[in-house]
Amino acid sequence: MRVGVMTARIMAERESDTLTTQRGSLARLAEAIATKQSAYLTVTQGESQGRRLKLADVPVTLGRSADCDFRLLNRAISRLHCRVWRDNSGFWVRDLNSTNKTYLNDRPIVEARLKDGDFITVGGTVVQFTQEKDLDHAAQSEFYDLVTNDPMTGFVQRRSFEQSLDQEIARSGKRGREFVVAIIDIDELSRINREWGKAAGDDVIRQVAKALRAGLRDEDVVCRYGGAEFGAMLPETSVAEAETLLNAVRSAIANVEFFIQGQSRSASVSIGLLGWTAELKTAAATLERAELKVRIAKDNGRNRIAS
């Protein structure tokens, strides 16, 4: 009996040791998996859209100051706007007494813990917090650019623009703020391609993109909307302000000279401009209304703005 009891006790101790070892292995495996995950801040709307920063154990400050780790020049952002840091429980964000507050998923916060997929809004710029497997960062950035950006102009693609527009609709609806959406359509691009050649048409597209980049502000979101079209969203902007900015862009494009086969040529754009209202609940509804405006501009003779 004693031998049997001792044998059972030894086996139980061995089983306990085995379970302890297994638990330790599982804990180490879980820890190893966790360490393979990295956290990132990615600008999804506003200035420097697509810009990405990998987070580490060192706190990161967002703001307009040259001393900030993640510097953003949007005029609505404070010099020291908010800080993101990591402790043993995860990542956190804290507002640094900014003028326009820090928003987490469209709600103002003083301090909050971050979870994968959260959106941090500072001024008119939206930054997404994500946690991902620690793959090659260069490859991730390249893939992100290919998926979100138009290779010819560098502007975001239409799908990304529509996502940003839906975010702006939700934010402006809650805060009662205005913004403007515009469709910029290159006049008779198909004729330009036919008569001047596809290379000339591509040059016109690039020149229009250049004029938009120079004429609009850092916080404005611009996309390659279609073959001959660009879309623009101007946050916290009145129709009058947007019309002044875009009319300057329209004039600049009309004054660009294209030398094709030794001859000077010119191009123009028609612009449909829409001040968003609360009845427009989605990006699709808003863009449909803006497209009606651009058709009015074309029907009235092109090279003009309809608002």
Image (tube, grey):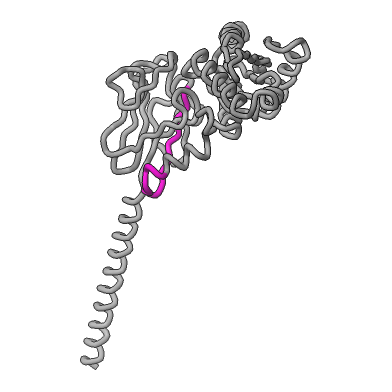
* The stretch drawn in magenta includes residue 5: no
Query: Quick check: 275 left or right of 220?
Result: right
Which sits in the foreground, 50 or 259?
259
Residue 4: quarter of image: bottom left
Query: Quick check: 52 left or right of 167?
Result: left
Question: x, y (%) of residue 61?
Answer: 32, 26
Quarter of the image where the N terminus is located? bottom left
Q: What residue is at 75 percent from the left and 18 percent from the top?
A: 295
Q: Is residue 166 visible?
A: no
Residue 204: quarter of image: top right
Query: Quick check: 292 left or right of 155?
Result: right
Q: What residue is at 60 percent from the left and 20 percent from the top?
A: 261
Question: x, y (%) of residue 123?
Answer: 45, 19
The magenta region covers 125-139
Please say if 30 is above or below 98. Answer: below
Question: x, y (%) of residue 216?
Answer: 52, 15
Which sits in the foreground, 88 or 83?
83
Question: x, y (%) of residue 74?
Answer: 43, 17
Which sits in the foreground, 301 or 30?
301
Q: Residue furthest front?
A: 262
Q: What residue is at 77 percent from the left and 10 percent from the top?
A: 300
